Image (cartoon, helix red, strand yellow):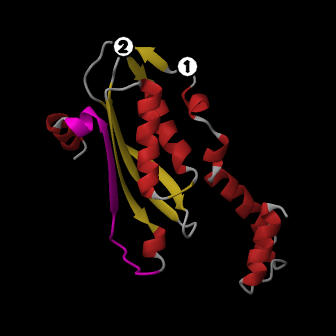
């Protein structure tokens, strides 16, 4: 059964008539939207980064902050929306700026929990750059908590992963945290 057929069945199970005018193309549109929202499954780290790794003698923090992200929680398949702050300490290589945002998108475009997403981004940056340290903080609002369940509209979840120098050196971690405020 195709994704489109599954959406038709879902509409029927909800008590809707998939043949009514407003819903005629909904299964097709919903299937296409879901494929786009989960396109990270069709991407690899190597494809996303390509040849955008460059030799550099920079040894200071490289930070890209406020990278917007959209993901779907794996528990309810509802969106969580927020921003990621990603930093690393180069070890002879720097990554093309847009590639950091593309790495965030690749992992966010999978069914996900925020805690794992944060780890996946940090591990990928460390793997691809060989950085001396990586720090990732994600702040997000979860529709599964806002639209259903406890219905808390103003809650934000914050997760962080600190690797290498960001974990081992309080001053490096503090500098990162002050930069993202």
Mark number for residue 128? none
Q: Position of residue 127 (x, y in %)?
A: 46, 30
Disc 1 secondary structure class: loop
Indicate left or right for 180 with 39 as reference: left
Magenta region, residue range: 149-168
Residue pointed to by mark 2: 56
Q: Position of residue 138 (x, y in %)?
A: 36, 51
Residue 13 visible somewhere in the drawing: yes
In the picture, the quarter occupied by the N terminus is bottom right
Indicate left or right for 151 with 73 as reference: left
User: Residue at position x 44%, y 66% from top?
Assistant: 142
User: Residue at position x 77%, y 67% from top?
Assistant: 27
Circle 1: is it few (<14), some (14-19), or many (20+) Cα within 10 Å?
A: few
User: Residue at position x 40%, y 24% from top?
Assistant: 130
Q: Please, is residue 2 above or below residue 180 in the view?
A: below
Task: Reply yes or no: does residue 150 show up in magenta.
Answer: yes
Residue toward you, 158 or 22: 158
Q: Position of residue 16 (x, y in %)?
A: 75, 84
Residue pointed to by mark 1: 51
Q: Please, is residue 47 above or below residue 69 in the view?
A: above
């Amino acid at each position: 059964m195709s994704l489109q057929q599954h959406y038709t069945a879902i509409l029927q199970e909800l008590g809707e008539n998939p043949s009514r005018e407003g819903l005629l193309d909904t299964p097709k549109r919903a299937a296409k939207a879901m494929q786009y929202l989960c396109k990270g499954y069709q991407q690899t780290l190597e494809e996303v980064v390509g040849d955008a790794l460059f030799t550099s003698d920079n040894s200071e923090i490289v930070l890209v902050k406020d990278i917007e992200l959209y993901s779907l929680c794996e528990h309810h398949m509802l969106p969580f929306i927020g921003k990621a702050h990603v930093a690393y300490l180069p070890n002879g290589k720097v990554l093309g700026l847009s590639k950091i945002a593309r790495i965030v998108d690749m992992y966010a475009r999978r069914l996900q929990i925020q805690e794992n997403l944060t780890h996946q981004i940090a591990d990928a940056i460390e793997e691809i750059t060989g950085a001396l340290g990586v720090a990732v903080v994600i702040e997000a609002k979860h529709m599964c908590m806002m639209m259903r369940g406890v219905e808390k509209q103003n809650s934000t979840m914050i997760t962080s992963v600190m690797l290498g120098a960001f974990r081992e050196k309080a001053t490096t971690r503090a500098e990162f945290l002050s930069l993202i405020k």
